């Protein structure tokens, strides 16, 4: 087991446990710092969805910065147990953790989100499968963060507004194209 730190907000510098799970790569501090500079340091009142939650780094970071609600979707039972333990330790009452498949959740939810985090396991084709569902998940003015092992120029019905890379991580911020 390893630990990562939350970099901003109420839980700044708190450590969360990360269980060793195949394919799990927590978003690096530097990338999270850039992402939350893009989104704004305060996320007061926003509804966030962390598909493929994994370590929960993105969702807990959003909750720490004042998100009204954070829904984390995770299928792996080991990662899920760590998410639940971290939420309990942090007393993260705004965090809802759902055991399930990210695609099925994205297909079935009717709730719009202000920010959607997409950081799936690499080299498994998840981005191509989830991309068509992303626009319907967004509220008016909503944003999608996508992390991948390659640069993404386009997602249908979304416009890339920011992007960067750090090592082998490519990260992107998208908004609705309309």
Image: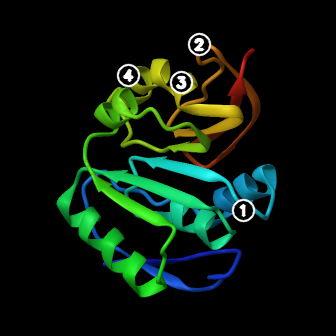
Whole-number angstrom distance, CA of label 4 to CA of label 2: 12 Å
Q: CA–CA distance between discs 4 and 3? A: 14 Å
Counting other residues with Cα less than 10 Å from the Cα at mark 4, is it few (<14), some (14-19), or many (20 or more)? few
Query: What residue appears at the point 41 percent right and 76 percent down from the top-left corner?
Result: 87
Residue visible at 48% across and 83% down in the picture: 90
Label of residue 129 in the image: 4
Q: Could you give the CA–CA distance between mark 3 and mark 2, rounded to whole angstroms?
A: 12 Å
**To which residue does mark 3 refer?**
136
Instruction: Give the answer, above or below, for where 149 lies relative to 39.
Output: above
Look at the image and tell me in which quarter the N terminus lies.
bottom left
Q: x, y percentage for residue 115?
A: 63, 44
Q: How far apart are marks 1 and 2 (CA)?
A: 27 Å
Q: Which of marks 4 and 3 is in front?
A: 3
Q: Do the residues labelled 1 and 4 touch (CB within 8 Å)?
A: no
Dividing the picture into quadrants, the one containing residue 165 is top right
Q: Please report whichever mark, 1 or 2, sits nearer to the chain's N-terminal start.
A: 1
Towards the viewer: 25 or 68:
68
Please state which of the two labelled residues, at mark 1 or mark 2, is closer to the viewer: 2
Q: In terms of secondary structure, where does tag 1 sit? A: helix
Res. 27 in view: no
On the image, numbered disc 2 is attached to which residue?
Answer: 156
148 displayed left or right of 17: right
Secondary structure under badge 3? helix
Question: For the residues carrying marks 1 and 4, which lies nearer the camera in this image?
Answer: 4
First of labels 1, 4 by sequence position: 1
Sequence-first disc among 4 and 3? 4
Q: Circle 1 sits on which residue?
A: 33
């Amino acid at each position: 087991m390893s630990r990562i730190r939350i970099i901003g907000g109420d839980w700044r510098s708190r450590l969360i446990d990360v269980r060793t799970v195949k394919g799990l790569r927590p978003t690096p501090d530097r990338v999270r710092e850039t992402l939350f500079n893009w989104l704004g340091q305060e996320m007061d009142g926003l509804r966030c969805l962390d598909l493929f939650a994994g370590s929960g780094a993105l969702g807990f970071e959003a909750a720490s910065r004042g998100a009204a609600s954070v829904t984390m979707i995770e299928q792996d039972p080991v990662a899920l147990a760590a998410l639940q333990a971290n939420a309990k330790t942090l007393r993260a009452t705004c965090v809802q953790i759902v055991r399930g498949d990210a695609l099925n959740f994205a297909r079935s939810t009717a709730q719009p989100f202000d920010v959607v985090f997409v950081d799936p396991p690499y080299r498994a084709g998840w981005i191509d499968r989830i991309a068509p569902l992303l626009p319907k998940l967004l509220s008016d003015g909503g944003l999608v963060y996508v992390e991948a092992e390659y640069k993404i120029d386009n997602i249908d019905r979304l416009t890339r507004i920011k992007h960067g890379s750090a090592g082998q991580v490519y990260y992107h911020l998208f908004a609705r194209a309309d």
